[in-house]
Image (spheres, helix red, strand yellow):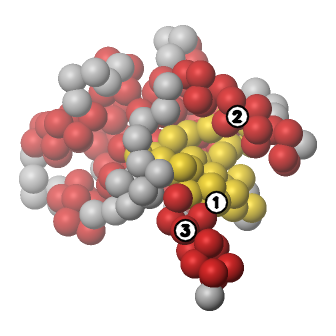
């Protein structure tokens, strides 16, 4: 399946880039991919061919919301129509990786309790670039389990600036 994932991701990236929406589509698909990967029930629904494709597409459109790019909606529809709805997670991961690679960047997955604004993303991108020595592209995952701060992962390296970790370190020092 890995080769197919790479092929689908490359095809989606080309289509999104042709529409001038590669960054937005990559971000929206990444968020959708995280949602699909976190729910066995959702993955099962998306792979159930006894459910009409239009209903499976409707589920994904509901998850994406009304602010999603029409390009993203069309690409998701195409994946579901091709029977790949349950592979949105791996395909979106690969699309983000390929998109970053074409820009000469590495991908950092950033988990935060709240959405980050453009200024926060730029400062974080800069800090991670300085720390890793690489040109970084970030994807933000809103994770309510993060009380505050952020946790960033670039490849195998994790930068944990979360409030929870700081509190745990403080507790250790006081013990």
Mark 2–mark 1 CB contact (< 8 Å): no
The residue at the point 68 percent across, 79 percent down is 173
Provide residue 73's location: percent of width, then percent of height. Answer: 30, 27
Nearer mark to the viewer, of 3 and 2: 3
Provide residue 154's location: percent of width, then percent of height. Answer: 71, 53
**Could you say whether the residue bearing mark 1 is in a helix, strand or loop?**
strand
Q: Nearer the viewer, residue 97 or 118?
A: 118
Q: Is residue 62 left or right of residue 122?
A: left
Q: Nearer the viewer, residue 130 or 27?
A: 130
Nearer mark to the viewer, of 3 and 1: 3
> Taking the image as drawn, is residue 93 in sight?
no
In three-dimensional space, the C-alpha distance between marks 3 and 2, rounded to whole angstroms, equals: 25 Å
Quadrant where the C terminus lies? bottom right
The residue at the point 27 percent across, 34 percent down is 64
Crowdedness near tag 2: few (<14), some (14–19) or many (≥20) residues, C-alpha within 10 Å = some
Q: Earlier in the sequence, mark 2 or mark 1?
A: 2
Provide residue 171's location: percent of width, then percent of height. Answer: 58, 78
Q: Earlier in the sequence, mark 3 or mark 1?
A: 1
Report the residue marked by disc 3. 167
Vertical relation: 165 (above or below) 24: below
Nearer mark to the viewer, of 2 and 1: 1
The residue at the point 76 percent across, 38 percent down is 127
Report the residue marked by disc 1. 160
In three-dimensional space, the C-alpha distance between marks 3 and 1, rounded to whole angstroms, equals: 12 Å
Q: Nearer the viewer, residue 43 or 62?
A: 62
In three-dimensional space, the C-alpha distance between marks 2 and 1, rounded to whole angstroms, equals: 15 Å
Q: Earlier in the sequence, mark 3 or mark 2?
A: 2
Report the residue marked by disc 2. 125
Vertical relation: 31 (above or below) 65: below
Crowdedness near tag 1: few (<14), some (14–19) or many (≥20) residues, C-alpha within 10 Å = some
**Could you say whether the residue bearing mark 2 is in a helix, strand or loop?**
helix
> For the view shown, which residue lies furthest in the right direction?
133
């Amino acid at each position: 399946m890995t080769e197919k994932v790479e092929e689908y991701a490359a095809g989606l990236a080309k289509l999104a880039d042709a529409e001038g929406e590669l960054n937005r589509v990559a971000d929206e698909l990444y968020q959708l991919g995280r949602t699909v990967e976190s729910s066995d029930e959702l993955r099962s629904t998306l792979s159930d061919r006894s459910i009409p494709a239009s209903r499976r597409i409707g589920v994904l459109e509901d998850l994406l919301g009304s602010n999603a790019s029409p390009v993203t909606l069309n690409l998701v529809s195409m994946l579901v129509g091709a029977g790949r709805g349950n592979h949105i997670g791996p395909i979106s991961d690969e699309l983000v990786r390929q998109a970053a690679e074409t820009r000469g960047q590495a991908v950092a997955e950033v988990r935060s309790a709240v959405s980050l604004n453009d200024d926060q993303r730029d400062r974080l991108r800069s800090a991670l670039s300085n720390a890793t020595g690489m040109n970084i592209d970030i994807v933000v995952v809103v994770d309510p389990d993060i009380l505050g701060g952020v946790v960033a992962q670039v490849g195998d390296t994790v930068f944990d600036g979360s409030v929870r970790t700081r509190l745990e370190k403080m507790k250790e020092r006081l013990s």
